[in-house]
Image (cartoon, rainbow, N blue to C red):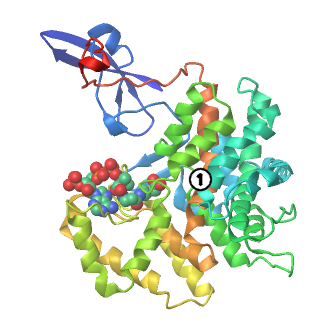
Amino acid sequence: MADSNKTATLTFDNKSFELPMHSPTAGPDVIDIGKLYGQADVFTFDPGFTSTAACASTITFIDGDKGELLHRGYPIDQLAEKSHFLEVCYLLLYGELPTAEQLEDFENRVTLHTMLHEQMTYFYRGFRRDAHPMAVMVGVVGAMSAFYHDSTDINDPWQREVASIRLIAKMPTIAAWAYKYHIGQPFVYPRNDLDYASNFLRMCFSVPAEEYEVNPILSRAMDRIFTLHADHEQNASTSTVRLASSSGANPFACIAAGIACLWGPAHGGANQACLEMLREIGTPDRIPEFIERAKDRNDPFRLMGFGHRVYKNFDPRAKVMKQSADEVLELLGIEDNPTLQTAKELEKIALEDDYFIDKKLYPNVDFYSGIILDAMGFPTSMFTPIFALARTVGWVAQWKEQLSDPAHKIGRPRQLYTGKTFRDYVEVENR
Ligand code: CMC
Protein backbone atom coordinates (compact mmCIF):
# COMPACT_ATOMS: atom_id res chain seq x y z
CA MET A 1 0.00 0.00 0.00
CA ALA A 2 1.53 3.29 -1.11
CA ASP A 3 0.98 6.43 0.94
CA SER A 4 -0.57 9.08 -1.24
CA ASN A 5 0.37 12.80 -1.11
CA LYS A 6 -3.32 13.46 -0.94
CA THR A 7 -5.25 13.94 2.29
CA ALA A 8 -8.97 14.23 2.89
CA THR A 9 -10.50 16.80 5.20
CA LEU A 10 -13.51 16.03 7.34
CA THR A 11 -15.31 19.04 8.74
CA PHE A 12 -18.10 19.10 11.30
CA ASP A 13 -18.99 21.16 14.41
CA ASN A 14 -16.59 23.86 13.19
CA LYS A 15 -13.66 21.47 13.50
CA SER A 16 -11.59 19.98 10.67
CA PHE A 17 -9.68 16.72 10.65
CA GLU A 18 -7.00 15.83 8.13
CA LEU A 19 -7.17 12.18 7.09
CA PRO A 20 -4.31 10.38 5.33
CA MET A 21 -5.00 8.69 1.99
CA HIS A 22 -3.44 5.63 0.33
CA SER A 23 -3.13 4.84 -3.35
CA PRO A 24 -3.65 1.31 -4.63
CA THR A 25 -1.95 -0.10 -7.74
CA ALA A 26 -5.44 -0.23 -9.27
CA GLY A 27 -8.87 0.94 -8.13
CA PRO A 28 -10.00 3.97 -6.13
CA ASP A 29 -7.83 5.74 -3.52
CA VAL A 30 -8.76 5.05 0.09
CA ILE A 31 -9.22 7.45 2.99
CA ASP A 32 -7.58 6.06 6.13
CA ILE A 33 -10.01 6.53 9.02
CA GLY A 34 -8.12 4.22 11.41
CA LYS A 35 -7.36 7.06 13.88
CA LEU A 36 -10.57 9.03 13.33
CA TYR A 37 -12.36 7.89 16.48
CA GLY A 38 -9.39 8.74 18.68
CA GLN A 39 -9.08 12.21 17.10
CA ALA A 40 -12.67 13.23 16.43
CA ASP A 41 -14.79 10.95 18.65
CA VAL A 42 -16.97 9.79 15.72
CA PHE A 43 -17.47 6.47 13.96
CA THR A 44 -18.11 5.99 10.26
CA PHE A 45 -21.31 4.19 9.24
CA ASP A 46 -21.32 1.75 6.32
CA PRO A 47 -23.56 -1.30 6.81
CA GLY A 48 -22.86 -3.84 4.09
CA PHE A 49 -19.38 -2.32 3.57
CA THR A 50 -20.42 -0.63 0.34
CA SER A 51 -17.62 1.97 0.59
CA THR A 52 -15.21 0.36 3.03
CA ALA A 53 -11.92 -1.37 2.24
CA ALA A 54 -11.42 -3.77 5.15
CA CYS A 55 -7.84 -4.78 4.29
CA ALA A 56 -4.97 -4.33 1.84
CA SER A 57 -4.50 -7.29 -0.51
CA THR A 58 -2.32 -8.27 -3.47
CA ILE A 59 -4.28 -11.32 -4.59
CA THR A 60 -7.30 -10.41 -6.71
CA PHE A 61 -8.54 -7.21 -8.33
CA ILE A 62 -12.01 -6.51 -9.77
CA ASP A 63 -12.89 -3.53 -11.92
CA GLY A 64 -16.67 -3.67 -11.62
CA ASP A 65 -17.36 -1.02 -14.28
CA LYS A 66 -15.18 -2.71 -16.89
CA GLY A 67 -16.24 -6.22 -15.86
CA GLU A 68 -12.61 -7.22 -15.27
CA LEU A 69 -11.30 -9.85 -12.83
CA LEU A 70 -7.56 -10.28 -12.33
CA HIS A 71 -5.75 -12.87 -10.20
CA ARG A 72 -2.25 -11.57 -9.37
CA GLY A 73 -2.72 -9.42 -12.49
CA TYR A 74 -3.76 -12.20 -14.89
CA PRO A 75 -7.27 -11.88 -16.41
CA ILE A 76 -9.72 -14.65 -15.60
CA ASP A 77 -10.62 -15.36 -19.24
CA GLN A 78 -6.96 -16.09 -20.05
CA LEU A 79 -6.59 -18.28 -16.98
CA ALA A 80 -9.82 -20.16 -17.80
CA GLU A 81 -8.68 -20.76 -21.37
CA LYS A 82 -4.94 -21.42 -20.98
CA SER A 83 -4.33 -22.48 -17.40
CA HIS A 84 -5.91 -25.07 -15.13
CA PHE A 85 -7.17 -25.11 -11.56
CA LEU A 86 -4.07 -26.32 -9.69
CA GLU A 87 -1.86 -23.85 -11.54
CA VAL A 88 -4.30 -21.07 -10.57
CA CYS A 89 -4.17 -22.35 -6.97
CA TYR A 90 -0.38 -21.99 -7.03
CA LEU A 91 -0.70 -18.49 -8.49
CA LEU A 92 -3.17 -17.40 -5.81
CA LEU A 93 -1.17 -18.92 -2.96
CA TYR A 94 2.36 -17.93 -3.94
CA GLY A 95 1.88 -14.85 -6.16
CA GLU A 96 3.49 -16.01 -9.43
CA LEU A 97 2.80 -18.62 -12.09
CA PRO A 98 4.88 -21.72 -11.28
CA THR A 99 7.75 -23.09 -13.36
CA ALA A 100 7.15 -26.64 -14.67
CA GLU A 101 9.17 -28.01 -11.75
CA GLN A 102 7.31 -25.95 -9.13
CA LEU A 103 3.98 -27.01 -10.60
CA GLU A 104 4.91 -30.69 -10.53
CA ASP A 105 6.03 -30.41 -6.92
CA PHE A 106 2.82 -28.57 -5.94
CA GLU A 107 0.59 -31.09 -7.72
CA ASN A 108 2.40 -33.92 -5.95
CA ARG A 109 1.97 -32.27 -2.58
CA VAL A 110 -1.78 -31.77 -3.16
CA THR A 111 -2.21 -35.30 -4.51
CA LEU A 112 -0.54 -36.84 -1.46
CA HIS A 113 -3.09 -35.23 0.86
CA THR A 114 -6.39 -36.20 -0.82
CA MET A 115 -7.36 -38.97 1.62
CA LEU A 116 -9.34 -38.25 4.77
CA HIS A 117 -8.55 -39.62 8.21
CA GLU A 118 -10.42 -42.96 8.25
CA GLN A 119 -12.15 -42.01 11.50
CA MET A 120 -13.94 -39.28 9.55
CA THR A 121 -16.14 -41.91 7.86
CA TYR A 122 -17.79 -42.42 11.27
CA PHE A 123 -18.22 -38.70 11.62
CA TYR A 124 -20.18 -38.63 8.32
CA ARG A 125 -22.40 -41.43 9.54
CA GLY A 126 -23.67 -39.23 12.36
CA PHE A 127 -25.53 -37.04 9.87
CA ARG A 128 -29.06 -37.72 8.68
CA ARG A 129 -29.05 -39.06 5.13
CA ASP A 130 -31.31 -36.24 3.98
CA ALA A 131 -28.97 -33.52 5.30
CA HIS A 132 -28.11 -30.85 2.74
CA PRO A 133 -24.50 -31.49 1.56
CA MET A 134 -23.60 -27.92 2.63
CA ALA A 135 -24.65 -28.77 6.20
CA VAL A 136 -22.30 -31.74 6.05
CA MET A 137 -19.49 -29.62 4.56
CA VAL A 138 -19.73 -27.01 7.34
CA GLY A 139 -19.56 -29.78 9.94
CA VAL A 140 -16.84 -31.91 8.36
CA VAL A 141 -14.50 -29.03 7.51
CA GLY A 142 -14.91 -27.61 11.03
CA ALA A 143 -14.22 -31.09 12.39
CA MET A 144 -10.88 -31.23 10.54
CA SER A 145 -9.47 -29.27 13.49
CA ALA A 146 -10.31 -32.33 15.62
CA PHE A 147 -8.51 -34.69 13.22
CA TYR A 148 -5.42 -32.73 12.14
CA HIS A 149 -3.99 -31.25 15.35
CA ASP A 150 -0.56 -30.98 13.81
CA SER A 151 -1.62 -28.17 11.46
CA THR A 152 -3.68 -25.89 13.70
CA ASP A 153 -0.90 -23.69 15.11
CA ILE A 154 -1.29 -20.50 13.11
CA ASN A 155 2.00 -19.10 14.40
CA ASP A 156 4.02 -21.88 12.78
CA PRO A 157 4.59 -21.19 9.04
CA TRP A 158 5.12 -24.91 8.33
CA GLN A 159 1.79 -25.82 9.94
CA ARG A 160 0.08 -23.02 8.03
CA GLU A 161 1.44 -24.45 4.79
CA VAL A 162 0.38 -28.01 5.64
CA ALA A 163 -3.13 -26.82 6.59
CA SER A 164 -3.40 -24.96 3.26
CA ILE A 165 -2.44 -28.01 1.22
CA ARG A 166 -4.67 -30.29 3.29
CA LEU A 167 -7.70 -28.05 2.78
CA ILE A 168 -7.23 -27.77 -1.00
CA ALA A 169 -6.45 -31.49 -1.36
CA LYS A 170 -9.22 -32.87 0.85
CA MET A 171 -12.08 -30.61 -0.18
CA PRO A 172 -13.00 -32.72 -3.29
CA THR A 173 -13.07 -35.85 -1.11
CA ILE A 174 -15.17 -34.08 1.53
CA ALA A 175 -17.68 -32.75 -1.02
CA ALA A 176 -17.88 -36.04 -2.94
CA TRP A 177 -18.45 -37.98 0.28
CA ALA A 178 -21.19 -35.55 1.35
CA TYR A 179 -22.89 -36.44 -1.94
CA LYS A 180 -22.31 -40.19 -1.66
CA TYR A 181 -23.63 -40.22 1.87
CA HIS A 182 -26.70 -38.25 0.78
CA ILE A 183 -27.58 -40.76 -1.98
CA GLY A 184 -26.74 -43.83 0.09
CA GLN A 185 -23.79 -45.07 -1.97
CA PRO A 186 -20.42 -46.18 -0.56
CA PHE A 187 -17.65 -43.62 -0.24
CA VAL A 188 -15.19 -43.75 -3.13
CA TYR A 189 -11.56 -43.17 -2.14
CA PRO A 190 -9.37 -40.73 -4.10
CA ARG A 191 -6.96 -42.00 -6.77
CA ASN A 192 -3.55 -40.40 -7.08
CA ASP A 193 -3.16 -41.18 -10.79
CA LEU A 194 -6.03 -38.84 -11.70
CA ASP A 195 -5.95 -35.08 -12.02
CA TYR A 196 -7.84 -32.93 -9.50
CA ALA A 197 -11.11 -32.54 -11.47
CA SER A 198 -11.18 -36.14 -12.76
CA ASN A 199 -10.59 -37.44 -9.26
CA PHE A 200 -13.55 -35.43 -7.97
CA LEU A 201 -15.85 -36.67 -10.76
CA ARG A 202 -14.82 -40.25 -10.11
CA MET A 203 -15.41 -39.94 -6.35
CA CYS A 204 -18.90 -38.56 -7.11
CA PHE A 205 -20.05 -40.82 -9.90
CA SER A 206 -18.26 -44.18 -9.73
CA VAL A 207 -19.64 -47.19 -7.86
CA PRO A 208 -17.74 -50.32 -6.82
CA ALA A 209 -20.03 -52.50 -8.98
CA GLU A 210 -18.64 -51.32 -12.31
CA GLU A 211 -15.73 -49.65 -14.06
CA TYR A 212 -15.90 -45.87 -14.37
CA GLU A 213 -14.02 -43.91 -16.96
CA VAL A 214 -13.82 -40.14 -16.55
CA ASN A 215 -15.10 -38.29 -19.61
CA PRO A 216 -12.30 -35.83 -20.55
CA ILE A 217 -14.85 -33.26 -21.75
CA LEU A 218 -16.53 -33.25 -18.37
CA SER A 219 -13.23 -33.21 -16.56
CA ARG A 220 -12.09 -30.14 -18.50
CA ALA A 221 -15.44 -28.42 -17.88
CA MET A 222 -15.23 -29.26 -14.17
CA ASP A 223 -11.70 -27.87 -13.96
CA ARG A 224 -12.88 -24.66 -15.65
CA ILE A 225 -15.74 -24.28 -13.17
CA PHE A 226 -13.21 -24.66 -10.33
CA THR A 227 -10.94 -22.06 -11.95
CA LEU A 228 -13.78 -19.55 -12.40
CA HIS A 229 -14.72 -19.79 -8.72
CA ALA A 230 -11.20 -19.84 -7.24
CA ASP A 231 -11.16 -16.37 -5.68
CA HIS A 232 -13.13 -13.13 -5.77
CA GLU A 233 -11.37 -10.68 -3.42
CA GLN A 234 -13.23 -9.49 -0.30
CA ASN A 235 -16.67 -11.08 -0.90
CA ALA A 236 -18.90 -12.03 2.05
CA SER A 237 -17.45 -15.52 2.67
CA THR A 238 -13.82 -14.37 2.28
CA SER A 239 -14.44 -11.49 4.66
CA THR A 240 -16.01 -14.01 7.05
CA VAL A 241 -12.86 -16.17 6.87
CA ARG A 242 -10.71 -13.09 7.55
CA LEU A 243 -12.87 -11.98 10.48
CA ALA A 244 -12.88 -15.48 12.00
CA SER A 245 -9.12 -15.68 11.52
CA SER A 246 -8.53 -12.25 13.07
CA SER A 247 -9.23 -13.74 16.51
CA GLY A 248 -6.51 -16.34 15.99
CA ALA A 249 -8.94 -19.22 15.25
CA ASN A 250 -7.46 -22.31 13.55
CA PRO A 251 -7.62 -22.59 9.73
CA PHE A 252 -10.23 -25.36 9.60
CA ALA A 253 -12.61 -23.39 11.84
CA CYS A 254 -12.08 -20.29 9.66
CA ILE A 255 -12.82 -22.12 6.40
CA ALA A 256 -15.90 -23.74 7.97
CA ALA A 257 -17.09 -20.19 8.78
CA GLY A 258 -16.52 -19.24 5.12
CA ILE A 259 -18.54 -22.24 3.94
CA ALA A 260 -21.41 -21.27 6.26
CA CYS A 261 -21.48 -17.76 4.81
CA LEU A 262 -21.23 -19.00 1.21
CA TRP A 263 -24.35 -21.11 1.68
CA GLY A 264 -26.79 -18.16 1.57
CA PRO A 265 -28.77 -17.54 -1.65
CA ALA A 266 -27.41 -13.99 -2.04
CA HIS A 267 -23.91 -15.51 -2.32
CA GLY A 268 -22.87 -19.07 -3.29
CA GLY A 269 -26.33 -20.52 -2.73
CA ALA A 270 -27.46 -18.55 -5.79
CA ASN A 271 -26.34 -21.32 -8.18
CA GLN A 272 -28.80 -23.81 -6.68
CA ALA A 273 -31.52 -21.13 -6.43
CA CYS A 274 -30.91 -20.05 -10.04
CA LEU A 275 -31.36 -23.49 -11.60
CA GLU A 276 -34.43 -24.09 -9.46
CA MET A 277 -35.80 -20.73 -10.66
CA LEU A 278 -35.10 -21.60 -14.33
CA ARG A 279 -36.91 -24.90 -13.86
CA GLU A 280 -39.82 -23.15 -12.19
CA ILE A 281 -40.08 -20.72 -15.11
CA GLY A 282 -40.05 -23.80 -17.32
CA THR A 283 -40.81 -22.29 -20.71
CA PRO A 284 -39.83 -18.94 -22.29
CA ASP A 285 -43.47 -17.77 -22.43
CA ARG A 286 -43.51 -17.52 -18.61
CA ILE A 287 -40.45 -15.23 -18.48
CA PRO A 288 -42.38 -11.89 -18.49
CA GLU A 289 -44.31 -12.99 -15.40
CA PHE A 290 -41.03 -13.61 -13.49
CA ILE A 291 -39.46 -10.39 -14.78
CA GLU A 292 -42.46 -8.46 -13.45
CA ARG A 293 -42.13 -10.20 -10.08
CA ALA A 294 -38.41 -9.32 -9.90
CA LYS A 295 -39.27 -5.66 -10.52
CA ASP A 296 -42.08 -5.58 -7.95
CA ARG A 297 -40.82 -3.95 -4.74
CA ASN A 298 -43.54 -5.72 -2.75
CA ASP A 299 -42.43 -9.17 -3.94
CA PRO A 300 -39.26 -10.55 -2.30
CA PHE A 301 -38.50 -12.53 -5.50
CA ARG A 302 -35.21 -11.62 -7.23
CA LEU A 303 -33.85 -12.86 -10.48
CA MET A 304 -31.28 -15.33 -9.21
CA GLY A 305 -27.95 -15.26 -11.02
CA PHE A 306 -28.43 -11.54 -11.75
CA GLY A 307 -26.79 -8.53 -10.12
CA HIS A 308 -23.60 -8.09 -8.18
CA ARG A 309 -22.28 -5.71 -5.55
CA VAL A 310 -19.13 -4.95 -7.52
CA TYR A 311 -19.87 -5.72 -11.20
CA LYS A 312 -21.90 -3.02 -12.88
CA ASN A 313 -21.18 -4.70 -16.20
CA PHE A 314 -21.01 -8.31 -17.36
CA ASP A 315 -19.43 -10.62 -14.79
CA PRO A 316 -16.44 -11.89 -16.85
CA ARG A 317 -16.89 -15.33 -15.27
CA ALA A 318 -20.47 -15.49 -16.60
CA LYS A 319 -19.21 -14.90 -20.16
CA VAL A 320 -16.81 -17.87 -19.95
CA MET A 321 -19.46 -19.96 -18.19
CA LYS A 322 -22.03 -19.29 -20.91
CA GLN A 323 -19.57 -20.33 -23.63
CA SER A 324 -18.65 -23.39 -21.59
CA ALA A 325 -22.33 -24.35 -21.18
CA ASP A 326 -22.80 -24.21 -24.95
CA GLU A 327 -19.68 -26.33 -25.54
CA VAL A 328 -20.46 -28.94 -22.90
CA LEU A 329 -24.07 -29.43 -23.95
CA GLU A 330 -23.05 -29.71 -27.60
CA LEU A 331 -20.26 -32.18 -26.85
CA LEU A 332 -22.64 -34.24 -24.72
CA GLY A 333 -25.20 -34.13 -27.52
CA ILE A 334 -27.80 -32.28 -25.36
CA GLU A 335 -28.57 -29.65 -28.00
CA ASP A 336 -32.17 -28.91 -26.98
CA ASN A 337 -31.70 -28.29 -23.29
CA PRO A 338 -34.90 -26.43 -22.31
CA THR A 339 -33.27 -24.88 -19.22
CA LEU A 340 -30.46 -23.42 -21.36
CA GLN A 341 -33.04 -22.06 -23.81
CA THR A 342 -34.99 -20.46 -20.94
CA ALA A 343 -31.77 -19.02 -19.47
CA LYS A 344 -30.72 -17.47 -22.81
CA GLU A 345 -34.16 -15.99 -23.41
CA LEU A 346 -34.36 -14.68 -19.84
CA GLU A 347 -30.93 -13.07 -20.18
CA LYS A 348 -31.95 -11.42 -23.46
CA ILE A 349 -35.24 -10.06 -22.10
CA ALA A 350 -33.70 -8.83 -18.83
CA LEU A 351 -30.82 -7.08 -20.59
CA GLU A 352 -33.31 -5.11 -22.72
CA ASP A 353 -35.50 -4.15 -19.76
CA ASP A 354 -35.15 -0.60 -18.36
CA TYR A 355 -35.27 -1.83 -14.74
CA PHE A 356 -32.21 -4.05 -15.22
CA ILE A 357 -30.45 -1.49 -17.46
CA ASP A 358 -30.94 1.36 -14.96
CA LYS A 359 -29.77 -0.72 -12.00
CA LYS A 360 -26.90 -2.22 -14.03
CA LEU A 361 -27.99 -5.78 -13.27
CA TYR A 362 -26.13 -8.30 -15.44
CA PRO A 363 -25.85 -12.10 -15.28
CA ASN A 364 -23.31 -13.25 -12.71
CA VAL A 365 -21.24 -16.45 -12.42
CA ASP A 366 -24.16 -18.40 -10.98
CA PHE A 367 -26.43 -17.83 -13.96
CA TYR A 368 -24.92 -20.49 -16.23
CA SER A 369 -22.87 -22.71 -13.89
CA GLY A 370 -25.91 -24.74 -12.77
CA ILE A 371 -26.78 -25.67 -16.35
CA ILE A 372 -23.35 -27.27 -16.82
CA LEU A 373 -23.42 -29.00 -13.43
CA ASP A 374 -26.92 -30.30 -14.13
CA ALA A 375 -25.79 -31.68 -17.51
CA MET A 376 -22.91 -33.42 -15.73
CA GLY A 377 -25.39 -35.21 -13.49
CA PHE A 378 -25.10 -33.24 -10.24
CA PRO A 379 -28.27 -32.59 -8.23
CA THR A 380 -28.88 -28.91 -7.40
CA SER A 381 -27.95 -29.52 -3.74
CA MET A 382 -24.35 -30.18 -4.87
CA PHE A 383 -23.93 -26.88 -6.71
CA THR A 384 -22.96 -24.80 -3.67
CA PRO A 385 -20.62 -27.50 -2.23
CA ILE A 386 -18.79 -27.41 -5.58
CA PHE A 387 -18.49 -23.62 -5.28
CA ALA A 388 -17.12 -24.11 -1.72
CA LEU A 389 -14.61 -26.69 -2.93
CA ALA A 390 -13.29 -24.31 -5.60
CA ARG A 391 -13.32 -21.19 -3.39
CA THR A 392 -11.28 -22.90 -0.67
CA VAL A 393 -8.03 -21.88 -2.34
CA GLY A 394 -9.15 -18.23 -2.37
CA TRP A 395 -10.10 -18.37 1.30
CA VAL A 396 -6.79 -20.04 2.14
CA ALA A 397 -4.72 -17.54 0.13
CA GLN A 398 -6.49 -14.60 1.81
CA TRP A 399 -6.14 -16.22 5.24
CA LYS A 400 -2.38 -16.71 4.71
CA GLU A 401 -1.99 -13.16 3.45
CA GLN A 402 -3.77 -11.80 6.51
CA LEU A 403 -1.61 -13.77 8.94
CA SER A 404 1.60 -12.73 7.24
CA ASP A 405 0.70 -9.04 7.65
CA PRO A 406 2.47 -7.90 10.86
CA ALA A 407 -0.13 -5.14 11.30
CA HIS A 408 -3.13 -7.47 11.39
CA LYS A 409 -5.41 -7.19 14.41
CA ILE A 410 -8.75 -8.55 15.56
CA GLY A 411 -11.68 -7.30 13.47
CA ARG A 412 -14.09 -5.47 15.69
CA PRO A 413 -16.64 -3.19 13.99
CA ARG A 414 -18.40 -0.47 15.98
CA GLN A 415 -22.11 0.36 15.83
CA LEU A 416 -24.65 3.13 15.62
CA TYR A 417 -26.59 2.30 18.78
CA THR A 418 -30.31 3.07 18.51
CA GLY A 419 -31.60 1.17 21.57
CA LYS A 420 -32.65 2.33 25.04
CA THR A 421 -30.19 4.28 27.11
CA PHE A 422 -29.47 3.56 30.80
CA ARG A 423 -32.45 2.58 32.94
CA ASP A 424 -32.80 0.88 36.33
CA TYR A 425 -33.99 -2.70 36.66
CA VAL A 426 -37.64 -2.99 37.74
CA GLU A 427 -38.74 -5.86 39.99
CA VAL A 428 -41.20 -8.23 38.27
CA GLU A 429 -44.10 -7.36 40.59
CA ASN A 430 -43.74 -3.68 39.70
CA ARG A 431 -43.79 -4.08 35.87
N1 CMC B 1 -33.35 -9.07 -9.24
C1 CMC B 1 -34.12 -7.97 -9.10
N2 CMC B 1 -33.68 -6.82 -8.56
C2 CMC B 1 -32.44 -6.79 -8.11
C3 CMC B 1 -31.57 -7.90 -8.21
C4 CMC B 1 -32.08 -9.07 -8.80
N3 CMC B 1 -31.31 -10.16 -8.90
N4 CMC B 1 -30.37 -7.60 -7.68
C5 CMC B 1 -30.45 -6.34 -7.25
N5 CMC B 1 -31.71 -5.85 -7.52
C6 CMC B 1 -32.18 -4.48 -7.25
C7 CMC B 1 -32.50 -4.28 -5.79
O1 CMC B 1 -33.85 -4.54 -5.51
C8 CMC B 1 -32.15 -2.82 -5.57
O2 CMC B 1 -33.21 -2.06 -6.05
P1 CMC B 1 -33.53 -0.63 -5.34
O3 CMC B 1 -32.32 0.24 -5.55
O4 CMC B 1 -34.74 -0.12 -6.08
O5 CMC B 1 -33.79 -0.92 -3.89
C9 CMC B 1 -30.95 -2.60 -6.51
O6 CMC B 1 -31.10 -3.59 -7.55
C10 CMC B 1 -29.60 -2.76 -5.84
O7 CMC B 1 -29.62 -4.01 -5.18
P2 CMC B 1 -28.92 -4.28 -3.77
O8 CMC B 1 -29.58 -5.45 -3.12
O9 CMC B 1 -28.87 -3.00 -2.99
O10 CMC B 1 -27.46 -4.63 -4.25
P3 CMC B 1 -26.39 -5.43 -3.44
O11 CMC B 1 -25.08 -5.03 -3.99
O12 CMC B 1 -26.59 -5.25 -1.99
O13 CMC B 1 -26.71 -6.96 -3.78
C11 CMC B 1 -26.68 -9.11 -4.79
C12 CMC B 1 -25.99 -7.73 -4.69
C13 CMC B 1 -25.79 -10.04 -5.59
C14 CMC B 1 -26.88 -9.68 -3.38
C15 CMC B 1 -28.05 -8.91 -5.49
O14 CMC B 1 -27.85 -8.42 -6.80
C16 CMC B 1 -28.87 -10.22 -5.54
O15 CMC B 1 -29.56 -10.55 -4.57
N6 CMC B 1 -28.77 -11.00 -6.67
C17 CMC B 1 -29.44 -12.29 -6.75
C18 CMC B 1 -28.62 -13.35 -6.03
C19 CMC B 1 -27.37 -13.73 -6.79
O16 CMC B 1 -27.40 -14.01 -7.99
N7 CMC B 1 -26.25 -13.81 -6.06
C20 CMC B 1 -24.96 -14.25 -6.61
C21 CMC B 1 -23.94 -13.14 -6.65
S1 CMC B 1 -22.48 -13.56 -7.62
C22 CMC B 1 -21.77 -14.95 -6.86
C23 CMC B 1 -21.48 -14.82 -5.42
O17 CMC B 1 -21.20 -13.75 -4.89
O18 CMC B 1 -21.50 -15.83 -4.75
The image shows residue 32, relative to residue 361, as above or below, that is above
Q: Amino acid at mark 1?
A: Ala
**Residue 119 placement (x, y as % from top left):** 85, 48
Q: Quadrant of ligand 1?
A: bottom left
Residue at image position (28%, 25%) is: 416
- Please, what secondary structure does the residue beneath circle 1 have? loop
**Residue 231 placement (x, y as % from top left):** 56, 49
Residue 2 appears anywhere in the view: yes
Residue 308 appears anywhere in the view: no
Q: Residues within 10 Å of mark 1 (few under 14, many from 20)?
A: many
Residue at image position (36%, 37%) is: 49
**Residue 122 placement (x, y as % from top left):** 81, 53
Residue 202, quarter of picture: bottom right
Residue at image position (39%, 83%) is: 282
The image shows residue 205, relative to residue 189, as above or below, that is below
In the image shown, does 61 or 428 lie closer to the viewer? 428
Left or right of 75? Residue 423 is: left
List the residue tagged with mark 1: 230
- Quarter that holds the C terminus: top left
